[in-house]
Amino acid sequence: MPDAPRHADWMAALAAHYDDARQRYPGERLLVMFDIDGTITDIRAMILDVLRQYDRAHQTEHFRHLTLGDITVSDNRIEGLLNSLPIPAPQHAQIADWFSANRWTPEAIYRSHRPYHGVLEVIRWFQLQPNTFVGLNTGRPEAVREMTLRSLNALGDIYRVSFPNELLFMNPGGWGGDVLASKVAGVRYFQAAGYRVIAFVDNEPENLAAIEAADPDHEILLLHADTIFDSRRERMPSQAIGGDSYALTSLLEKGEIPGKIQLVWHAVNSARRIEEFLQARVHWGEFDVRRDPFSGALVTRQYSYTAVPPVSREETAPLLSDTLERLKKAGKGVKLDLRAGLETVDEVLALTRAAGFDGTGLWFNGRIERLLEDGFHKLSVAYPAAILQCSIDFLAPLILGTPAKAKEILDMLTGWGLNRFSVRWQTLNKRQIIRQMEGWGLEVNIFEIPNLEQFLKATLLLPRSITADFIHPGLQEPPAAP
């Protein structure tokens, strides 16, 4: 394989290298290899936790005000940190010895794992690709295998990331074993298991240099996680590409999203937006249905006439009847947010029938207190195959705290005919909420996503659908509809 191109963005370099490998080796099992400490997990979190444990064990306050930002050395250079703190020099040796004895206990490993921002989403993205795997190649010894897997899988759970035992290679030499030889042995282990190792991410320059020496054809892209490292930067291979931000946006080509997610273009209400939607590749469009206070007709308008009054009586919004006819003719899917509530349901049903829609092309959204049981029931009876949706953000505390009670309410709503439930992306603990909803067999829609990066993170959860504003910078050319 030719030398890797020099990219300012290391994730873009990885994306380009991965795309090239897929074309060169179709059908082969491709593997991206990661180190753990200083690459996936922030080693500073472990250092801080263990030092605070020292304070508790010895009834001292040496590290009471220590923060992650104060730690600029690895766990192998703890003396350098102690020298920078106002701690009496005679105590340094005792603290360093205690730290060394306690830094890799099972409790320390499990308690202090903290991932770098974005790294688990990047790993999740690779794990979703066909014939693509993520392997771990760490200098940790076999003695901590069980705890390593347990802590990493606990960390990755809400991101849908899992690390199987067979994809973890650990230092066979134990504590103090030859790490450089172990890293090369890890590559050979994965190759012997039938994987083609295409990239290696590590924070130590000398580890990358060892892999470069063992890979004369430069098939393995070397990526330096520019965090905290012990080996000299001068040991960095000339082919290595460095970075300190795991940007998911660099991995995804426009038009690619994982899984079969239904995409919905939010607030396609104005005449201009409707024209853009008709030309777009997104199948579903969302329209806010309101009643014009002057004509009495149903129109598509994002804001209520009370919140944003019209400039004049001559200001008009697109008629719902005309919009439905155009969308039906174009073969588009229509999501109607019935903002005006129950009193418009019969009229909306009449207009959708007149436009020739059947249930497979319709999606109704509404607030529970506005449509009530009667409104959702009418929609369900008229279009049994349609999607009926409401937001369940109000249920978030119950879903997490009293799931049995939340399930009772959701059962009531499904009894009304609702078959999909929407979760705002800004909702706290959204990943746990979505996981619980899916565990109950309920379809989830994610909405109010602010930008491209957050949109891509939402896709990694594989919800049934995502509602997003595709006029946002970075989303003007939305991914193709599944």
Image: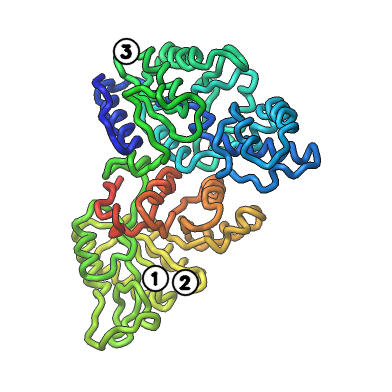
The coloring applied to the image is rainbow
The residue closer to the viewer here, 304 or 3, is: 3
C-alpha distance separating marks 1 and 3 = 63 Å
Left or right: where does residue 214 sit relative to residue 163?
left
Looking at numbered disc 2 in the image, what kind of residue is underneath it? Leu
* Location of the C terminus (image quadrant): top left
> Residue 206: percent from the left, percent from the top?
45, 21
Q: How many marks?
A: 3
Circle 2 Cα neighbour tier, 10 Å, few/some/many (<14 / 14–19 / ≥20): many
> Residue 79: percent from the left, percent from the top?
63, 30
Give the mark nearest the N terminus, 1 or 2. 1
- Residue at left offset 62%, top offset 31%: 78
Give the mark nearest the N terminus, 2 or 3. 3
Which one is closest to the eye, mark 1 or mark 3? 3
> Residue 287: percent from the left, percent from the top?
32, 67
Give above or below for 457 relative to 362. above
Badge 2 marks a residue whose secondary structure is helix
Identify residue for label 3.
Answer: 216
Residue 124, picture quadrant: top left
The residue closer to the viewer here, 449 or 463, is: 449
Q: Which mark is residue 338?
A: 1
Identify residue for label 2.
Answer: 371
> Residue 253: percent from the left, percent from the top?
28, 41
Give above or below for 434 relative to 218. below
Badge 3 marks a residue whose secondary structure is loop
Task: Look at the image and tell me whether residue 358 can be seen.
Answer: no
Looking at numbered disc 1 in the image, what kind of residue is underneath it? Leu
Q: Are marks 1 and 2 in contact (CB under 8 Å)?
A: yes
